[in-house]
Image (cartoon, rainbow, N blue to C red):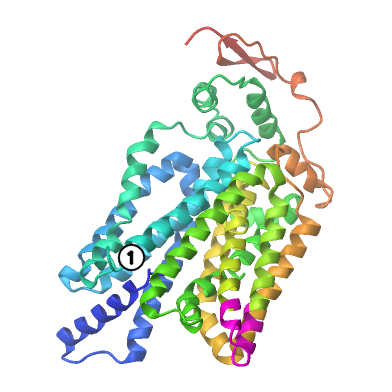
Amino acid sequence: MLFVYPSFQYIKDFYNHTAVRRNGKGLSHDSITVLYSITVSIFAIGGLVGSLTVGMLVTKFGRKGTLVKSTILVFVAGGLMGFSRHLSIPEMIFIGRFITGIHSGISLSVVPMFLGEIAPKNLRGFLGLVPSIFICIGVFIAQILGLHELLGKEEHWPVFLSLVVVPTFIQLMVLPWFPESPRYLLIEKHNIHATLNALRQYRAKANIQAEVEEMQKEQRSLSSLRTVSVLELLRDKAVRWQVISIMVINIGMQLSGIDAIWFYTNSIFENAGISVSQVQYTTVGTGAIEVIAGLIGCFTIERVGRRPLMIGGFSFMGICCAGITLSLVLQVYVPFMHYVSVICVVGIIAGFCIGPAGVPFLLTGELFKQSHRPSAYIVGGALNWISNFTVGFVFPFLQMSAGAFSYLVFFSICAGVAVYVYFVIPETKNKTFVEISQMFASRNNCELEGEQLPITEYFGLRVKNQYGALENKGKEEMYLWSDDE
C-alpha cells in the first residue's frame, strides 16, 4: 500500500532533516527518492515473506489461531512507526513497514482461506469478497483521515502510520470468540466433537448432517491426509490446471495496472486541471468509488457467478488502459482528453474492485481441496507480492521509455487474463470442493481417488440432537448422533 497523499512528502522531509542532524548536510533528491522507494517497496517484500509462511502456520495453529497469533506483528510495527519521529530513527519506519507487510502477506491468504472454509457453499462467494470490501473501506477511511483538516498535517503523520493497531485490536477482541474452521477440525485434526460444535455455532439451526457428509467425502477423496508441500503441489498432475489458473489470475491481478494507476492518480488529476489543493478530495472520491464497486461485486457474485465478474472486470480495465493511452496521446491536441483520462482512471479502479480485487483469493481456495489449499495460497500469495513489487519497481522505467504507450502493456495483460478465464476456469458457484475438483479432472487427464462409493455405503447417520460420536465398526467408521453432551 502506498502512503496517503500528502503524508509521503512529510516522510521525505523527515528523512532529509534526520540526515542533516546526523551528517550536517541534507540528502540529494535522488537519495530521498531511493529511501522513499525502499519505504514503499519493503512492504511488498514483507508481504512475500509472510505469504511463504502461511502453509506452516495454518497447519500448526489452524486458520483462526494463525490470525489471532499474527496480530502481535501489527502492534510491534505500529509502535515502531509511531515513535520513529519522536526518536529521530527513520529505520524504524522501514522495519515497521516490513513487519506490517509480513502480517498482510499472512492475512491476505489466511482470511480468504478461513472464510471459504466456514461459509456454506451458497454464500462462499459473498464471504470470499468481504475481505476486499474491508480493504477498500480501510483505504477510504485512510484517505479521509489523511485530509489536511484531520491527520494530514506534518505533526500527525506518525499517528497516522500507527493507526494500523486500531482494527487489529478490534480483531483481537472479537476473533477468539469464533470457532475454528470445521473443515480444519475434521479433515486435519479428526476432532468430530469440535467440528460439530463449530458447525452448530456457524449454522445456528441449519441441518449440519449433509455438510458433515460432504466434508467426509472430501476427506476420502484426498490422496494424502497431510498438507502437501509447495513442491509436491507443483509436481501433482492431478491439480496441474488449478495451479496454472491461480498463477495466471494472481499475477494478472497485480500486473493489470492497478498499482500504477494508484501511484499516478494524483498526477493524472493535476494534468486534468484539478488544483493541487483539491486533488486530495478527488482522491477521496475515488476511494468512495472503490467501496461502491466492491459492494456491487460482493452482492452480485452469488447471482452472476465468479467468471462474469473476472472476465468483465479485466475486460473493462483493459479497455480503460487503452483509453488512458489514447487520451494521453491526444490531450495535446484535444483539450477534453484530460477528462477522458480521469474517467479511465475511475473506470480501472471500479473494474478492479468489482471482480479482480477479490475473486482471485476466493478462487485460490475453491480450486483446491483441504490437503492442497495451504500450499496453493503460498503459490498465489507469493506470485501476487512478487508481481506487486515488480510493477512498483519497473513501471517508472517503463513509463520513461514508452510514455503513454506503457499502459498498452496492462491492456494486453488484462485481455489475456480475461481470455484465459473464459476458456479454462469453470464456474464454481454453489459447487462443493469435490465437485470443483471433478470439473478439472478431465482437463488434468486424471481420475480422482476415493470417489467410487456414495457416502451412504461408508457411513450411517442417525440424527437426534446435533451432537455426535465417532465409532469404529470393523473397517468402517460411523457417525452416531446422540443426546449426550
Decide if residue 426 is in sight here. yes
Q: Position of residue 268 (x, y in %)?
A: 50, 79
Give yes or no for residue 308 being in the magenta stretch. no
In the rendered view, does 275 fall on the left or right side of 90? right
In the rendered view, does 139 fall on the left or right side of 402? left
Main SS of the magenta part reads: helix
Q: Nearer the viewer, residue 36 or 57?
A: 36
Give yes or no for residue 336 being in the magenta stretch. yes
Q: Nearer the viewer, residue 249 or 445?
A: 249
Q: Position of residue 302 (x, y in %)?
A: 66, 42
Q: Position of residue 158 (x, y in %)?
A: 24, 66
Q: Position of residue 439 (x, y in %)?
A: 79, 45
Quadrant of the image containing the N terminus: bottom left
As drawn, 363 above or below 249: above
- Three-letter residue code for mark 1: Gly
Q: Residue at x 51, y 51 (%)?
A: 133
As drawn, 368 above or below 465: below
As drawn, 68 above or below 322: above
Q: Residue at x 56, y 63 (%)?
A: 384
- What segment carries the magenta color? 324-340
Q: In terms of image quadrants, where is residue 345?
A: bottom right
In the rendered view, does 25 fall on the left or right side of 112? left
Decide if residue 228 is in sight here. no
Q: Residue at x 77, y 64 (%)?
A: 419
Q: Nearer the viewer, residue 461 or 426?
A: 426
Q: In terms of image quadrants, where is residue 461?
A: top right
Q: Nearer the viewer, residue 121 or 268?
A: 268
Residue at which label 1 appears: 146
Report helix, strand or loop for mark 1: loop
